[in-house]
Image (cartoon, rainbow, N blue to C red):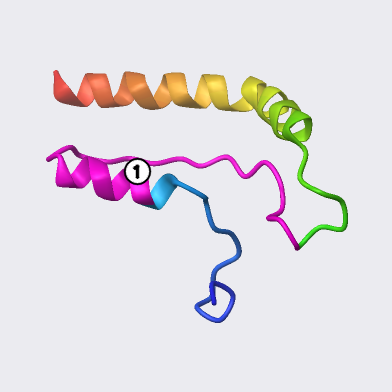
Amino acid sequence: MVRALGGDIVGMSTALEAIAARQAGLEVFGISLITNLAAGIQESPLNHEELIDAGKTAEARLGPLLAQIVTRISDADS
């Protein structure tokens, strides 16, 4: 269905978390890290260690990006 709508990826929980945050009256800015293909799409079974490794690999790029985002949001609120 996502492909039919023009999408390439789907996060498992990001949308639900954003909906819950908005329902609680919070503003939302979301970033998702895609760590693996969904069950049934890749030939091998899902593996938690691969997920952890993907997160560790992305840490070097995402850490500085998140720091910049937080700084800019903080500066904008000042």
Q: Is residue 54 left or right of residue 2?
A: right
Residue 12 image position (x, y, % from top left): 51, 50
Identify the main secondary structure in magenta.
Answer: loop
- Residue type beneath disc 1: Glu
Residue pointed to by mark 1: 17
Q: 23 or 78, which is in the foreground?
A: 23
Q: Is residue 47 left or right of residue 20?
A: right
Q: Residue at x 71, y 46 (%)?
A: 36
Please determine whether, in this image, residue 72 is positioned above or below residue 2.
above
- Tell me where the magenta segment starts and ends, as one range: 16-40
Q: Dividing the image into 4 quarters, which one contains the C terminus?
A: top left
Question: Going by the picture, which residue comes out furthest to the bottom?
Answer: 4
Tell me which corner region of the image, top left, top right, bottom left or bottom right, holds residue 2. bottom right
Q: Residue at x 71, y 53 (%)?
A: 37
Q: Dividing the image into 4 quarters, which one contains the N terminus?
A: bottom right
Q: Residue at x 70, y 34 (%)?
A: 51
Q: Label 1, secondary structure: give it.
A: helix
Please determine whether, in this image, residue 69 is positioned above or below residue 23.
above
Residue 31 image position (x, y, % from top left): 46, 40
Q: 29 or 41, which is in the foreground?
A: 41
Residue 40 image position (x, y, % from top left): 75, 62
